[in-house]
Amino acid sequence: MQVGIVGIGHVGLPTAAALAHLGHQVVAMDSDSEKIDALNHGSMPFFEEDMEALVAEGLNSSRLRFTTAVAAVADGAEVVFICVGTPPRASGEANLQAVEQAAEAVASVATGDLVLVGKSTVPAGTGDRLLRALEHYKLKVKLTVVSNPEFLREGKAVYDSLHPSRILVGSDSPDALEVMRRLYEPLLGEGGAEWIQTDIRTAELAKHASNAFLALKVSFANAMARVCELAGADVTLVADAMGADPRIGRSFLNAGLGYGGYCFPKDLSAFHRLAERLGYDFRLLEEIARINEEAVESVYKKIEDAMWNLEQKKIALLGLSFKPGTDDTRLSPSLALAERLMAGGAEVVGFDPQANENAQRDLPGLKVAESIEAALEGAHCLVIATDWPEFKDLNLREAAELMTFRAIVDARNLLDGDAASAAGFSYVPVGKPSIKARREGE
Ligand code: UGA
């Protein structure tokens, strides 16, 4: 099947490469000509596990093409995906200008009937609005609107594109639903993805609801962490005990520094604004965001408490991306913490396996180190801010030698507290009792 993609970002690129892998002819378009040049030379616009190989496979097989020309996307395509950004407006609402522009651009060059698929995360009602907008265009062909939200995780986007748990398609047109089913056929069937077919509004809403519910779990875990700290209980064991109940599930119950990234924070506020506009005050969503901010403040207080005065103290901040497996630092809780620490007078030196460059772009005052060791050199406190697996294997005895003070604040509960104590560190985790440094002979 011939497929077009408009917008080559964290959603458009994995979608394009995965559909090419499934055997479709895919033309992906972005207005950023530097990005297109780089992609055509096999260079990725961001770090994403296995993406380079999947894109190379697509280019080599000639099933995947990158272009800046929207006409190339629409020409002969049966399906065109809109994967452009929906950034937040100052009000928290989603800005849908890029979606409208993309739809209009495709409509103006379409040479045959096609299915126009909304894959960007949008508030419920956007598909309907798009249908109304199409009525204004001077169309020579028939465009059918479909909502097909993505559930890709950054860092696992290739895996999630090829092994989705569900494929959600919303449309009022049986013909369009049939086209979408044919497109995804290789991923369906025994052991494959669940096919869920709804109207457009329901599909759009299900995406916002999914992200909001995952954020709710994270904030529930962080609120529990506060209670565990007051009660002297262990939040990880509470989460394990809760998660053993299949009705609850263990995932997304890790307390720490809270959620970040370009999805949860903006989707939560867009969902809240949508509910408000429809006439429902969904206050729970506000509370989820408030608890999330509290998570950063709570870790800040732990560091301040460990350091006494932050002035003249060097904080080694390990992990700058909003989660492991990505170089994405947008709305990273780690950077929020860095900013807070710097405002408090501390010197912050960050290190991230992938995100140093982006972190400096997003937080210009931040110093970054080329290695973990360089970040630790002379530091007074080691803070684990993102749970990259490589930090788990940190040689704590070597770290203790490099640092001025022996203090660890583990904002992701990643390290072994007893091992840290044995290496001479005072160890402060989240939502569980701190462990004192064990001295020689103890
Ligand atoms: C999220 C959803 O998981 C995807 O299904 C969705 O497609 C995507 O948003 C999107 O809307 O595009 P993503 O933003 O990549 O994916 O990140 P997640 O893996 O969901 O993690 C979000 C944040 O929650 C991270 O900052 C992570 O560190 C934090 N988190 C996650 C916790 O603090 N604790 C947990 O137990 C789990």
Image (tube, rainbow, N blue to C red):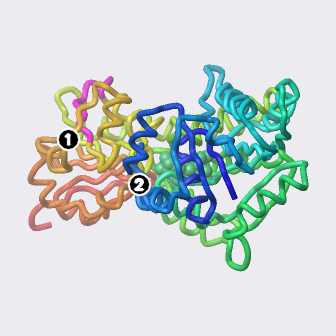
311 w.r.t. 169: above or below: above
* Type of the residue with mark 1: Ala
Q: Disc count in the image?
A: 2
Q: Quick one: 33 or 350, which is closer to the camera? A: 33
Q: Residue at x 26, y 24 (%)?
A: 345
Seen in the image, is 365 located left or right of residue 52? left
Q: Position of residue 9 (x, y in %)?
A: 52, 42
Q: Position of residue 168 (x, y in %)?
A: 75, 56
Q: Residue at x 81, y 44 (%)?
A: 113
Pointer 1: what residue? 369
- Quadrant occupied by the N terminus: bottom right
Kindly give the residue lying farthest to the bottom in the view shown. Answer: 190
Q: Residues within 10 Å of mark 1 (few under 14, many from 20)?
A: some
Mark 1 and mark 2: span between their CA atoms?
19 Å
- Residue 206 drawn in magenta: no
Pointer 2: what residue? 325
- Residue 348 drawn in magenta: yes
**Which span is picked out in magenta?**
342-350
Q: Quick one: 423 or 289, which is closer to the camera? A: 289
* Type of the residue with mark 2: Gly
Q: Position of residue 409 (x, y in %)?
A: 31, 48
390 w.r.t. 74: above or below: below
Seen in the image, is 63 located left or right of residue 54? right
Q: Position of residue 397 (x, y in %)?
A: 14, 61
Contact between marks 1 and 2 (CB within 8 A): the answer is no
The answer to whether the residue bearing label 1 lies less than 8 angstroms from the nearest atom of ligand 1 is no
The answer to whether the residue bearing label 2 lies less than 8 angstroms from the nearest atom of ligand 1 is no
